[in-house]
Amino acid sequence: MAVTSSRYGRQEIFYGIGPEGQKKLKKGRVAIVEMSAIGTAVANNLARAGVGFLRLIDGDYIDVSELQRQSLFTEEDAHEERVKAVALQEYLQKVNSEVTVEAEVTMLDGGNVDSLFEDVDVIVDASDSFETRLLINEACHALKKPWVYGGALAASGMVKAFMPGGEEPCFRCFIGDEEYVPGEQPTCATEGVLCSTTSTIAALQCAEVLKILTGSDMVNKNLISFDLWDNSFEYFEVEKDPECPVCRGEYKYYGKVSGSHTVSMCGKDSMQIIPSVEGEVDFEKYARVLEHQGKVKYTKYTLDFDDGDVQIKLFKTGRAIIKHVSDEKRARAVYAEYIGL
């Protein structure tokens, strides 16, 4: 179906973009980390704005508990437990056939971050993982890439564009020496989150991305903080920390590939096992092994196993989500028993 030349007309007459800015957007390349409520909204907005290339990075599947805030997925998607990145890729290609959308069914880590970030212009953080943000910050500092942070909790949110450069602060400058301790920080699973909160964050992030891609001098240097329930909207200056280890090139996460590890899934009562060495899992072979122990079904991207007690979603790289398990030792035991660790 032909696309008319007036598709971006309302955007091109906006003084901040114009026809030349639209051409820059068409050449722009953006990576979005995690297809969360924020990430899906960001991807939708950027695709409709005509950003030429979008890389969707997410290794999770769609769950019905997310539909309250996920604006682009359906009950059918959740029922089929479709892989987020692929489902969104298919949707966005129908939204705008002029945009190249690439689905990366993986979790961002120290082993793949270079290949996922090196050829893009901007990275958008839509993660709910503190460690993932620290990795994004370190990788973008090393690769000299701008990235846009976004965090949501209940009715409040924060957004900031972190720009490369010797005098610019980084995310570590912002958080200081704060370390993540599981169970001690509030999360969306414990405090809840509003759809309007995630939508607002995505809108603010997209505006910053459009500014960066068009070379605007209007990129917001401040941290934007808001609370939709308290009707507050504030700006805070983030100062560069002269003692910041990241700014000195000392990285804790970037360039580091650890052994197998376990990650809790926010709001899903599940644990994720990431093997120390990833490979190409033969689903047909695994299905034959597991079919005598329970129900097995698989697609191009995932294999599902259910014996009435244990439920596993296995991905092609060997990464797996152990459902309805909140204990790390139990999750690793299940993985070892059914898949091998």
Image: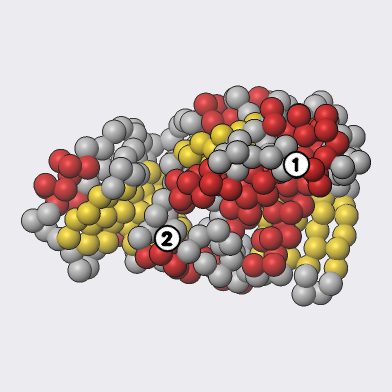
Q: Which residue is mark 1?
A: 6
**Left or right: where 289 falls relative to 49:** left
Identity of the residue drawn at 20% across and 68% down: 308
**Left or right: where 265 falls relative to 214:** left
* Circle nearer the N terminus (2, 1): 1
Of residues 5 and 74, the one drawn nearer to the viewer in this rendering? 5
Helix, strand or loop for disc 2 = helix
Q: Nearer the viewer, mark 2 or mark 1?
A: 1
Q: Which residue is mark 2?
A: 77
Residue type at the position of mark 2: Asp
Q: Quadrant of the C terminus?
A: top left
Residue 5 can be seen, yes or no: yes
Of residues 39 and 102, the one drawn nearer to the viewer in this rendering? 102
Q: x, y percentage for residue 176?
A: 74, 46
Identity of the residue drawn at 39% across and 55% down: 82
Q: x, y percentage for residue 13?
A: 87, 42
Callout 2–callout 1 Cβ contact below 8 Å = no
